[in-house]
Image (spheres, rainbow, N blue to C red):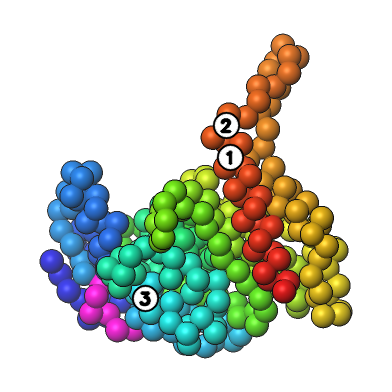
């Protein structure tokens, strides 16, 4: 294993060994190796790169190092900065996972159940990608997750740029078992008073987080942005939840022969109800 001391050294090591795989916490990588799904020809360890293990303020944004662990993001000082991301980090799994797993790894692995992903989508975060010869480029996190912008073999996620909204934001998830575990559905809701907007992203139910844009615009039009953003009526919160769930888990398309569409299966119907409940609760907590 190669152990570079800087981001540019890590990029150079990957350029010199195109078949090598970068590894930080290794929570996803080693699981794949142990299951026989991956046999990397070499490893470039990122654990000694101090520049990506913290964060800094930059033009109204937080520039988060990709090496930040879930445990570090879950601490109170980080929670005061980006509450929803801290909540997602605290829900990422048992202590051994939170202590090892990193923000950059969560993004690079792009597992649908990655807890940080819907939060970053709702925050409209961007990624700072490090390339050869000190090159840097920025892409929206949603583009990478959707496969529209792919990392080149000698590129690494160096930082995540997140706008500091100084407004309520909430992350909630449902799991199939008691306590922290893999999400069956998750929802992030972010209020953006400066743009009079509500941003919502639903995770774990599709290959990448889903943004129900029409539901966002509709609920934002009901909020008194010039007042104290008093809680909406329960009926409006419930309607928002249903709107989000129907947008992310739509009814089946009618058959070509004009017969009625088939009903949702019990499992899918349960998932839709779960998403609706999470969205309703998340918005209610954000507004309160």
| Residue 90 visible in the picture | yes
Front tag of 2 and 3: 2
Task: Give the quarter of the image for residue 240.
Answer: bottom right
Dot 1: element = helix
Looking at the rendered structure, which numbered label has been put on residue 270? 1
* Residue 266: image tag: 2
Q: How many numbered dots are placed on residues in this image?
A: 3
Q: How crowded is mark 1: few (under 14 residues within 10 Å), some or many (20 or more)?
A: few
How far is the residue under mark 2 from the one under mark 3? 37 Å
**For the N terminus, which image quadrant?**
bottom left
Residue plotted at (69% across, 64% down) = 283
Question: Where does label 3 land, which residue?
Answer: 71
- Answer with the quarter of the image where residue 50 lies: bottom left
Mark found first going from the N terminus, 2 or 3: 3
Q: Nearer the viewer, residue 254 or 288?
A: 288
Residue 129 seen from this side: no
Asked if residue 209 lies in the magenta stretch, the reply is: no
Secondary structure found at label 3: helix
Q: Which residue is drawn at 65% across and 82% down?
A: 166
Q: Give the range drawn in magenta.
A: 46-51
Cβ atoms at labels 2 and 1 below 8 Å apart:
yes
């Amino acid at each position: 294993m190669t152990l570079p001391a800087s981001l540019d050294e890590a990029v150079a090591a990957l350029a010199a060994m195109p078949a090598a795989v970068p590894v930080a916490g290794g929570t996803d990588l080693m699981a794949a190796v142990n299951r026989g799904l991956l046999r990397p020809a070499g490893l470039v360890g990122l654990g000694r790169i101090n520049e990506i293990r913290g964060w800094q303020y930059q033009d109204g944004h937080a520039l988060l190092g990709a090496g930040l662990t879930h445990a570090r993001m879950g601490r109170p000082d980080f929670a005061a900065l980006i509450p929803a991301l801290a909540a997602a980090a605290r829900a990422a799994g048992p202590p051994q996972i939170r202590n090892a797993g990193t923000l950059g790894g969560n993004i690079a692995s792009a597992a649908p159940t990655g807890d940080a992903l819907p939060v970053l989508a709702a925050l409209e975060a961007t990624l700072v990608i490090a390339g050869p010869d000190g090159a840097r480029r920025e892409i929206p996190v949603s583009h990478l997750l959707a496969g529209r912008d792919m990392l080149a073999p000698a590129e690494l996620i160096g930082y995540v740029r997140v706008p500091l909204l100084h407004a309520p934001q909430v992350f909630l998830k449902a799991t199939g078992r008691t306590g922290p575990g893999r999400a069956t559905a998750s929802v992030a809701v972010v209020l953006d008073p400066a743009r009079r907007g509500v941003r919502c992203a639903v995770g774990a139910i599709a290959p990448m987080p889903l943004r129900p844009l029409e539901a966002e615009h509709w609920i934002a039009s009901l909020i008194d942005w010039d007042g104290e953003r008093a809680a909406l009526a329960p009926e409006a919160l419930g309607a928002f939840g249903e709107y989000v769930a129907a947008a992310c888990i739509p009814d089946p398309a009618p058959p070509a022969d004009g017969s009625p569409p088939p009903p949702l299966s019990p499992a899918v119907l349960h998932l839709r109800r779960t998403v609706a409940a999470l969205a309703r609760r998340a918005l209610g907590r954000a507004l309160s």
